[in-house]
Amino acid sequence: MKAPYYIFTLVLLFTWLSSSTSQDVKKVTRNYGFFKEVYSHVKPDTSIKEGSYRLFYKHQLIEDGNYRNGKRIGQWQYYSFNNLLEYEYDFDSDSIVRIGSNNRIISSVRTPCFYKGSPLIPYLFMVDHVNYPEKAVDEDISGRIVLNLMIDKNGKVYGYYISEKLHPLIDKAVLKVASDLPDEWEFLSATRNGAPIKSEYIIPLEFEID
């Protein structure tokens, strides 16, 4: 005769847990400039992400994945311009599982260097922080410049240079920004035969006078 009592107690406990969990999970939308973060959290501190996460740039999805206790888990998709998949990364196995939208097979011989996130992040950082020299505007200087970041085996930037120069004034402005990249940036170093190697991350920039 005690079974119904236990069943009733378990039902109440399950109901309470479900109600408590649904009340604790909150959805957060955070806007900063042209970026928008949409994520969930289960703690009063909204900076600790929990559950699904999406990052948008001008309404375009550029990062999509999940968090657990503030750490990225599972497979994440990182997109470049025009919603093109740059690559997919599995944080549980610490490995790239897909490159590009065409399901390109991951080579066991060599993989390229990637920014650990959407490639739009480093590109837009450079675009937003490079001060176009007034003299360059007066001289109507425009064109392409390519910045190379030197990445060590651990995915850290240890140097930089310009592989495709445009003009001394603009080259200097780009190098100045490159000297002050965010410390929290992470890169996935290139690999050869499964082992990480020193590599370079390339950021092409176009300067035009409107």
Image: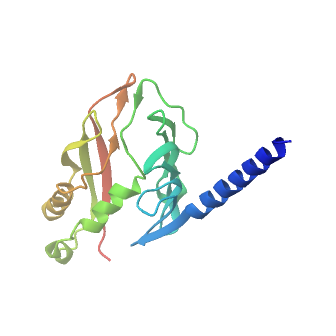
**Which colour scheme appears in the figure?**
rainbow
Residue 81 is left or right of residue 192, and the answer is right
Residue 23 falls in which quadrant of the image? bottom right
Percent from the top left, x then y, of residue 174?
Answer: 20, 59
On-image quarter of the N terminus? top right
On-image quarter of the C terminus? bottom left
Residue 56 is left or right of residue 165, and the answer is right
Percent from the top left, x then y, of residue 64?
Answer: 52, 53
Residue at coordinates 17% horizontally, 77% vertically from top-left? Answer: 138
| Front-lying residue, 33 or 69 | 69
| Front-lying residue, 141 or 19 | 19
Residue at coordinates 33% horizontally, 55% vertically from top-left? Answer: 122
Q: How many marks?
A: 0
Percent from the top left, x then y, of residue 41?
Answer: 50, 59
Residue at coordinates 21% horizontally, 70% vertically from top-left? Answer: 131
* Residue at the top extreme of this rendering: 193
**From what the image shows, is residue 23 above or below residue 197?**
below
| Front-lying residue, 207 or 131 | 131
* Residue at the front extreme of this rendering: 1
Percent from the top left, x then y, of residue 196?
Answer: 33, 29
